Amino acid sequence: MANNLTDIILNDPDISYMGNNPKSPFGEEGCQCADGWAEIILTALKDVAKVDSNKVMRIGQIKEKFGGLRLYMDYPHDGGDMLYDVVNKITSQAEHDSYSICENCGSKDNVTQSTKGWIRTLCKICRKVE
Ligand SMILES: [Zn+2]
């Protein structure tokens, strides 16, 4: 699902270096989730950009899975374990936060996970429309 958010990420000067590998899933597929999670994703990527001073990280994949955000970073093994741990904390927090934010519209009100079929994290209003 290439969307507006994909363009925002690829054009943001702070984080564009992470999306510039055309061979990575992210480069080919873009964000595979809806725009409601834009803020969590952009915040997490900017936090990664701040700690990754050597700019070695690449975005592996950004997608929705089992109702939650998955933010996979491609990590070169010579980048240092400390960087890996810090980035892991940032992406884990983003994934955790996504369960209380509507994937469609970004609302934090009445957000739940569906219990049947394709599990999605949506607010009451978006769930009715779906
Ligand atoms: Zn919603």
Image (spheres, rainbow, N blue to C red):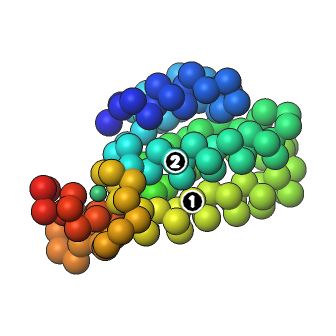
Identify the residue at the far left of this view.
129
Image-quarter location of ligand 1? bottom left
| One can see residue 74 in this view | no
Q: What residue is at 72 percent from the left and 47 percent from the top?
A: 47
Horizontal side of 90 relative to 2 (left or right) equals right
Q: What residue is at 28 percent from the left and 65 percent from the top?
A: 123
* Disc 1 residue crowd, few under 14, some 14–19, many 20+, Cα 10 Å: many
Horizontal side of 49 relative to 63 (left or right) equals right
Q: Which sits earlier in the primary sequence, circle 1 or circle 2? A: 2
Identify the residue at the far bottom of this view.
115
- The amino acid type of the residue labelled 1 equals Ala
Q: Which mark is residue 127?
A: none
Secondary structure category for the residue under label 1:
helix
Q: Is mark 2 within 8 Å of ligand 1?
A: no
- The amino acid type of the residue labelled 2 equals Glu
Report x, y in % for residue 85: 77, 61
Q: Quadrant of the C terminus?
A: bottom left
| One can see residue 29 in this view | yes
Q: Is residue 97 above or below residue 3?
A: below
* Disc 2 residue crowd, few under 14, some 14–19, many 20+, Cα 10 Å: few
Give the residue number, with chain letter if any, for mark 2: 39
Q: What residue is at 47 percent from the left and 45 percent from the top?
A: 38
Question: Which numbered disc, 1 or 2, marks the residue closer to the eye?
Answer: 2
Q: Which mark is residue 94?
A: 1
Q: Quadrant of the N terminus?
A: top left
Front-most of 76 and 109? 109
Report x, y in % for residue 87: 72, 54
